[in-house]
Amino acid sequence: MRLRRATCVTCYWHAGSFVAHPYSGGTPTALHPVAAEILSAFDDWIEPAKAAELLDHLTPETIAESVDALTSAGLLLAEESPEAARDEQIAGQWETWAPEASFFHYATQDGHYPTEEELAACEADSAQWDTPPPALFTDYPDAPRVLLPRRPGDLRVPYDQVLYERRTHRDFTPDPVPLATLAVLLATTFGPVDFIDCGHGALFRRTSPAGGARQELDAYLAIRNVSGVEPGTYHYNVHEHALELRSPGLTAEEAAHLCADQAWAGDAAFLVVLSAVLDRMSCKYRNPRCYRVCLLNAGHLAQTFALTATALGLGPAQTGAFHDTPLAERCGLDNIGHTPLYVLAAGWPHPDPRRAPPPARLSTFIRTALRR
Ligand SMILES: Cc1cc2nc3c(=O)[nH]c(=O)nc-3n(C[C@H](O)[C@H](O)[C@H](O)COP(=O)(O)O)c2cc1C
């Protein structure tokens, strides 16, 4: 029977071991690094005996044992097996984004979810709580700060109006956004609504749902055009309802450049960088799948931001395209424990937008496959 190395395999060193991880199925397996050479002899369908000829510096016993182990780990697949078909299909489907995205997607699938009993045992295991959890709030006590006004904003706009009027805006007027408007937007989106007892202390809840209520996402602002606030990058301190200066100055060119050279980002009055404090999530949720939850949480906050900005008359926008390293640097983030995930933006919407997409017309639909 001919065998082939699984196409969907990522190899790495972890905790001192060389691991081959077949992510279309199979088991991540610690191997001797020589196994990589054996695997590469199976680049294409081949009889194990023929592969052994290519590996003539290894003993037949070593090769036979390795082939058995690699096959049961799902690293070598049998020709015409359902596993081989699935591996090929996944490799084909994910080709554009492989290996980074496909590995993350499949390697974090179908994990073990703790039972009620396991969760209770874990809660009772005081050793887990020996290291104090990270602080509930991020703050920079020595930073110069702007205490924000606390006047409640008028958000009594009909729900359907907000929902249907929300659009991504890429054209803004040069009018500054009043500080009071920014303050309402920040408090509504990121401020605590209430506090709960999680058994090991308090957590807070926001207007958006958040996996485990860990609130690992902080808001950093790159402000260019807000009345009463010098241009610069700031951290929104949700505890104090204040802006803490991270670094002074910001030009439209720099704001645009940070957002992957998108000119509209330079025209926005301010950007909001959603940045994850990873320990807040990982100290409780140790499964790597929980990184997905951080990304999902960012999406929830972004939607609340967009709807609230719309209700306040602002034009919201968002981008997944940004230069991570300089953006983190500009916000004073180490990009290790505190790392940017998503960039939001807003300003006053331009009455005559140039960058808004035109509506689809008959000629557009003619060029569109509406069904298979
Ligand atoms: C996660 C995400 C990333 C986006 N990234 C960009 C971007 O990099 N540049 C951009 O101009 N628009 C970006 N957008 C805006 C989308 O293009 C926009 O939402 C889409 O065209 C639908 O229009 P609407 O938001 O007005 O409904 C992004 C939207 C989302 C949700």
Image (tube, rainbow, N blue to C red):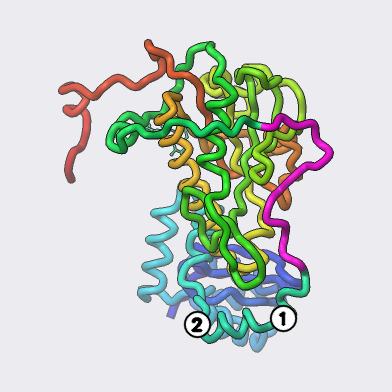
Residue 277 horizontal/vertical position (percent): 67, 52
**In the rendered structure, which amino acid carries the disc numbered 2?**
Glu
Can I make out residue 99 in this image? no
Q: In the rendered view, would you say 150 is above or below 18?
A: above
Residue receiving disc 1:
126
Magenta-span inclusion, residue 234 = no
Q: Residue at x 77, y 74 (%)?
A: 130
| Front one among 44 and 312 | 312
In percent of the image, x 61 and y 37: which residue is there? 273
**Circle 2 is placed at which residue position?**
116
Query: What kind of element bears circle 1?
Result: helix
For the stretch drawn in magenta, the main secondary structure is loop
Residue 102 in the image: above or below residue 220: below
Image quadrant of residue 85? bottom left
User: In this rendering, is residue 290 above or below 185?
Assistant: below
- 128 w.r.t. 310: above or below: below
Q: What's the CA distance linking mark 2 and mark 1?
A: 17 Å
User: Where does the image place residue 192, in percent across and percent down from the top left?
Assistant: 57, 49
| Dot 2 beta carbon under 8 Å from ligand 1 | no
Q: Quadrant of residue 357?
A: top left
Which segment did they paint magenta? 132-147
Q: Residues within 10 Å of mark 1 (few under 14, many from 20)?
A: few
